[in-house]
Image: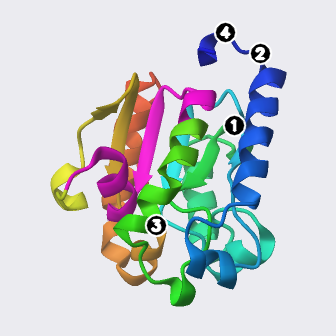
Amino acid sequence: AKAWTLSRSEREQELLVLKNQVAACTRCQELAETRTQTVFGVGNPEAKILFLGEAPGADEDRLGEPFVGKAGQLLDRIIKACSLKREELYICNILRCRPPGNRNPSDQEAANCREYLDGQIAIVDPDYIVCWGSVAARNLLNTTSSIGRMRGRFFTHGRAKVLCTYHPSYLLRNESAKKDVWEDMKFLMRDMGIELGKK
């Protein structure tokens, strides 16, 4: 069914079906054997904006939710600064399992998980997708460009406008990039008709 014909409760139901498939998934043997639990995604099934990260870390693996560690706390501050609320958004990752040692997802792992990502995007049907970091951007858009090259303009995925910016964990190591992310958020919100103040 086309997402725009789905009611909120129908979308919630379709996401739940997908979430249960993910919970039983063993496509990536190593990840299935080492995970505490799968980290599917959270938020509004009718979100206008979908946030896409790379993979769960230790905190996410423990709690079963994306972006709950230090990077997630920074993301929460960014969301608040944009006059948004976390529950208005839909948040998920390229992978639904934590790679051991928080290494980057392999191409095969990302490919194994792609069906679930595509399913989530199709059900939520967002107007905008924000790729946080190069892993998210590379996998969603099938590109090899750096975030620095991709910032400041929209790409498209289906009918969604896609914005690429630095991952919050990168900002924890590189304070100076915070102003870049703020510029990116202003660019996104301006396209939605919302002017954000100086930061």
Q: Residue at x 33, y 49 (%)?
A: 164
* Residue 95 placement: quadrant: bottom right
- Amino acid bearing label 1: Glu
Q: Which residue is mark 4?
A: 5
- Amino acid bearing label 4: Thr
Q: What label does residue 7 carry, if any? A: 2
Q: What label does residue 177 carry, if any? A: none
Q: Residue at x 67, y 84 (%)?
A: 34
For mark 4, give the secondary structure. Answer: helix
- Say whether residue 24 is left or right of residue 140: right
Q: Residue at x 52, y 45 (%)?
A: 115
Q: Which residue is mark 3?
A: 109
- Of the two numbered discs 2 and 3 in the rendering, the one whose residue sits closer to the viewer: 3
Q: Which residue is mark 1?
A: 88
For mark 1, give the secondary structure. Answer: helix
- Amino acid bearing label 2: Ser
For mark 3, give the secondary structure. Answer: helix
The relative height of residue 130 versus residue 100 in the rendered view (above or below) is above
